[in-house]
């Protein structure tokens, strides 16, 4: 079951990458709270897209070969991104609004889950 969830998370991260890469303006306009963080930045959104692509692909590869170290590397970007969004939520005073719901479902849970599953994966020698 862990492997299936890892593949689902990897697919989610790769699909997120594609969404950011091919539809950056739609992403910016439709993501709750994003416009409050600053103006549209095409370069930055593309950078984030590539980070998700590498994280998702590495997570899928780690699940395929069954290596904890590769899984942890693949989960690193989504996990750190989730921690960053948690700090934003804390600075906002923990309101549960559209911004928090979007962050929680789309960033925080997937990132923490990916790292949690990666860290619990069996080691191989």
Image (cartoon, rainbow, N blue to C red):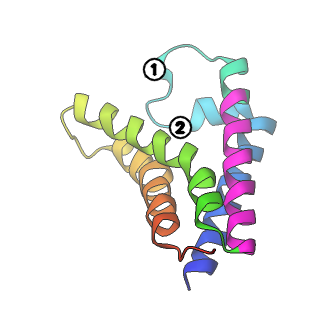
Q: Secondary structure at mark 1?
A: helix
Of the 4 image quadrants, the one containing the C terminus is bottom right
27 relative to 16, above or below = above
Describe residue 106's horizontal placement relative to residue 11 as left or right.
Answer: left
Q: Which residue is mark 1?
A: 37
Callout 1: few (<14), some (14-19), or many (20+) C-alpha neighbours within 10 Å? few
Q: Is residue 75 left or right of residue 86?
A: right
* Magenta segment, prevailing SS (helix, strand or loop): helix
The residue stretch that appears in magenta: 47-65
* 3 relative to 106 in the view: left or right: right
Query: Residue 86 appears in which quarter of the rendering?
Result: top left
At a point 66% along the width and 22% down the height, the residue shown is: 44
Q: Residue 4, image x and y in percent?
A: 63, 80
Q: Position of residue 35 (x, y in %)?
A: 50, 22
Residue located farthest toward the top when viewing the structure as drawn: 39
**Residue sitting at x 61%, y 30%:** 28
Q: Report x, y in % for residue 114.
A: 52, 61
Residue under the point 67% across and 60% down: 59
- Cα distance between the residues tagged 2 and 1: 11 Å
Q: Position of residue 43 (x, y in %)?
A: 72, 19
- Asked if residue 99 shows in the view, the reply is no
Please say if 20 is above or below 101: above
Determine the residue positioned at 52% across, 65% down: 118
The residue that label 2 is drawn on is 31
Residue 50 colored magenta? yes
Give residue 100's quadrant in the image. top left
Above or below: residue 43 compared with residue 112:
above
Q: Secondary structure at mark 2?
A: loop
Q: Quadrant of the N terminus?
A: bottom right
Q: Is residue 101 visible?
A: yes
């Amino acid at each position: 079951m862990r492997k299936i969830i890892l593949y689902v998370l990897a697919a989610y991260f790769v699909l997120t990458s594609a969404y950011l890469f091919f539809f950056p303006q739609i992403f910016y306009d439709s993501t709750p709270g994003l416009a409050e963080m600053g103006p549209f930045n095409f370069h930055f959104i593309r950078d984030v897209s590539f980070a998700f692509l590498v994280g998702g692909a590495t997570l899928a590869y780690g699940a395929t070969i069954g290596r904890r170290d590769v899984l942890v590397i693949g989960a690193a970007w989504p996990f750190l991104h989730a921690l960053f969004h948690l700090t934003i939520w804390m600075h906002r005073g923990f309101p549960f609004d559209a911004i928090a719901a979007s962050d929680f479902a789309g960033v925080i849970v997937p990132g923490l889950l990916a790292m949690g599953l990666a860290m619990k994966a069996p080691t191989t020698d």
